[in-house]
Amino acid sequence: MSPYFTKAFWTLALCFVSLSGWTQGTPDSLREPTQKYGLRAGIELSKLLRTSLDDDYTGLELVGDYRLSEKLFLAAELGSENKTTFERIVDLPLYRYNSSGAYLKAGVDINNYKNWFGEQNLIFFGLRYALSTFKMEVYERYLYDSYRYYEPDSFVLFSEDKIEYNSLSASWIEIVSGFKAEVLPNIYMGMSARIHFLLSYNQPDNFDSLWIPGFNKKTDNSRFGLGYNYSISYFLPLYKKPKKNLEEQTSF
Amino acid sequence: MSPRIKLLLLILSCTLLTQCEKDDVCVEGDTALLHIAFYDKDATGEELQPKAVTRLRVVSVDENATINTFSDRSTQDDILIPLDSRKNLGDFVLISNSATEDNLETGQIEELRISYTPEAVYISRACGFVGQYADLGIEQTGLSSWISSIEINNTRIDNSDEIHVSIFH
């Protein structure tokens, strides 16, 4: 299954799930003009799915947020990824490398969704500061050559000896936009899209930080990257607080 | 729709669209070729006088084939020779006025041994690594024929534009 199909499938699935969630305004909720505060913790789904489908990838990401006020949430993602890539031009192999490491993203989400009573859904915008520490390994290195005099049908394999680049790091910020919908009591499904802006990274000697765990693919001439996140999480209510703009809301 | 929802949809659709990647094309670099220029050995004055070699044929001895960077048996005042990055030397035969008569080569034959240290140099995501060469050396291995003298201008071959070797004839 192509990654594009996988992503499109989850996008659609979550749209349906979340729409059905939003349309259920239960009458009971009218008697509860309070809002739940607590901790939400969960797991990112696309990385799990990709781990099971793609032999060259393993990844795990834990997601969590903590509600600070009516709209403001502290949010974080903690993850680990390991990916092997074989770069080719058409069918001709160029080089194979692996990136592996861990990352932490921390920041805030601001909820903009005006919930009906009893609903606890979010349409949010957020900001993260992210750090990754990782290592890279380069395996086969072929020499790109447009004449190919010595091997007309492939590039010359220069070396298969592994080169290791340890203690690499990168930092970036993410602008997040997404939603979280309560699909079962205290169970949330969410999706977010992210624009990454790379602040710093290591340039390994005679190679490049081509793929950074948590950041994704780093393109040659741009500091921007893109990410997405599909999560299922459990909300642990800790206390309740009345809704601030109660009068405005009761006019419904 | 509120502007916020519009922005949300915009970001989501951008993410989906950019997952289709363009085909990566390597334009940033290429494996370097040895660049040899031919000059007049009898030229007077400071300036080098280019002097073309007529009906030039260059054969790699190991491959037993003419090199493919210029048309065989054509007149050239500079040539590019591909080096084998799996080895650190290559034997080449440079034939001036090359022609075949009764299955025999009638041109003047010059044998050269080119030595070097190949390196894989990272260029970009699309190109990956290209071959470059250090410690260039050239030796006339056979009897001197049409070449009078050889000068190495740069022992490092990191591009094909620069002239690395001057041959006087």
Image (cartoon, coloured by chain):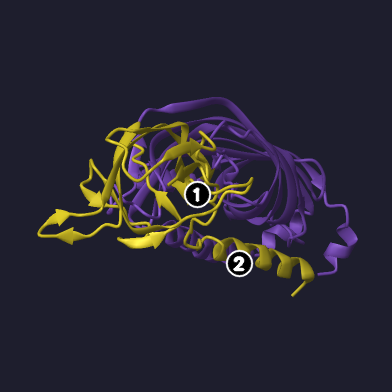
Chain colours: A purple, B yellow
**The C terminus of chain A: image quadrant:** bottom right
**Mark 1 Cα within 10 Å, few/some/many (few <14, many 20+)?**
some
Instruction: Identify which residue, A140 or B7, lies in the foreground.
Output: A140
Count every numbered label the image shows and give the total. Answer: 2
Q: Decide: is B61 above or below A14.
A: above
Q: Secondary structure under badge 1?
A: loop
Q: Chain of mark 2?
A: B
From the viewer's perspective, tell me whether residue A168 is left or right of residue A47: right
Quadrant assignment for the N terminus of chain A? bottom left
Q: Which residue is mark 1?
A: B160
Q: Which residue is mark 2?
A: B13
Q: Is residue B79 left or right of residue B99?
A: right
Say what amino acid the circle numbered 2 marks. Answer: Ser
| Residue at 34% in and 52% down | A148
Q: Residue at x 68, y 59 (%)?
A: A28
Q: Are marks 2 and 1 in contact (CB under 8 Å)?
A: no
Asked whether the viewer can see residue A169, the reply is yes
In the rendered image, the residue lying farthest to the left is B102
Tell me the chain of label 1. Answer: B
Counting from the top left corner in percent of width and height, residue B67 is at: 31, 53
For the residues beneath circles 2 and 1, the answer to whether they share a chain is yes
Residue A249 relative to residue B116: left or right: right
**Precedes in sequence: disc 2 or disc 1:** 2
* Tag 1: amino acid: Ser
- Image x and y of residue B33, in percent: 44, 47
Q: Secondary structure at mark 2?
A: helix
Q: Residues within 10 Å of mark 2 (few under 14, many from 20)?
A: few
Q: Nearer the viewer, mark 2 or mark 1?
A: 1
> Which is nearer the eye, A206 or A185?
A206
Image location (x, y in percent) of residue B66: 27, 53
Tell me the CA gap for discs 2 and 1. Answer: 44 Å
Foreground pick, A181 / A199: A199
